Image (tube, rainbow, N blue to C red):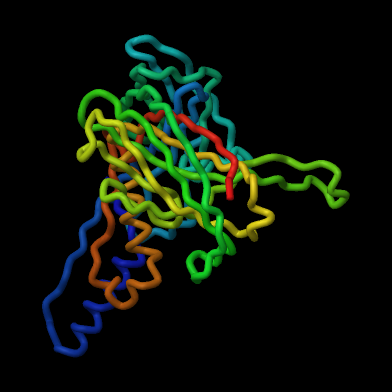
Amino acid sequence: MIIKGVNSILGLLALLLMLTIFFSCEKKLKLEVETVPRLVVSSFLEADSIAQVTVLASQHILADREDIVTIEDANVALFEGDNFVETLQFVGNPFELNTYFRADTFGVYQSNYRIKAGEEYRLEISAEGYENVEATCEIPRRVMIDELVVNQLRPNNTTDYSASAKANVRFGFQDAVGVGDYYWVQIFRERYEYVDESLADSVLYWEPVLFEMQEEAVENLYNGLGYLLSDASFNEEHVDMHATIYLPCDEMDCTNLPIRVELRKIEEAYYQALKSYQADQATNFNPYVGFIEVFQEATLIYSNVENGYGVFAGSAVAWKMADLED
């Protein structure tokens, strides 16, 4: 496991030091931490997309988080089932890749091969000075959204999310056969960004919107990343979901605005990674935790990489669009 939450640990050590001073305790504490660096792998494969893998080196638990060690000379081999696919090429630290939730775009290796739904993939990675690591994942088959309605656009008369307007979203899908299915829901709005000051050229992109879901089956992700769903409560049933979206525009500007709902079917490893990310964010960046934070333990980040740390997991995304109605 990767141990994170450095601020919490330092806070706890500071608290122990203060208690030692106040109560004149003479007991000595010995902190033993593994210092042998290991490879850290992060790769979230998506059906019909190329593979991207980040390879870093692990850090001491008290190291500065900004001191990232990029591994630029690793051998990253990708297999589909038992068949070798290719050796991924190092493409540097390209911030322009904007690899959302894919390891901060440091130390990225990239393939030319498009990932297939329903297939199992394996990574074998070696680098001088580190133990070889290996990880496997399976790419789910996408689950289609069969209905989407976005309506009841109205002013947002509360202070929620500093949004001027809000609207209702309803969508449905048929849960996949078998138990243990996991989903990640995100909602986006269409937006144009002008390339230059002349306003003549613009680029279309999809901006995430903040939203709320009230169903008991959903789990809210920290920092507006969406919601997670598990089929534990709706196995193999048709699922109808409801959300309230918050929009930073007035009613006139929002009318007929295209809204896009993404339903990403994810592996359990993907689900666990998002959950541990959620726990880490809540531990380290929650402004409401306050002084209680010093009593919290470091977060154990989920890992499924053999002989190393990190996450190798698969997903398949389906999406549907609808214009926002009055």
Q: Give above or below for 171 relative to 154.
A: above
Residue 269 placement (x, y as % from top left): 29, 36
Quarter of the image where one finds residue 286: bottom left
Q: Give above or below for 193 relative to 322.
A: below
Residue 188 or 125: which is nearer the viewer?
188
Residue 38 placement (x, y as % from top left): 34, 40
Quarter of the image where one finds residue 237: top left
Q: Residue at x 88, y 49 (%)?
A: 198
Q: Residue furthest right?
A: 198
Q: Where is the N terminus found, in terms of image quarters?
A: top left
Instruction: Give the number of marks.
Output: 0
Residue 271 placement (x, y as % from top left): 31, 40
Residue 45 or 143: which is nearer the viewer?
143
Q: Residue at x 23, y 71 (%)?
A: 295
Query: On the rendered structure, is 154 left or right of 9?
Result: right
Residue 272 placement (x, y as % from top left): 29, 42
Q: Residue at x 38, y 40 (%)?
A: 184
Residue 158 or 32: which is nearer the viewer?
158
Query: On the rendered structure, is 172 left or right of 209?
Result: left
Residue 276 or 323: which is nearer the viewer?
323
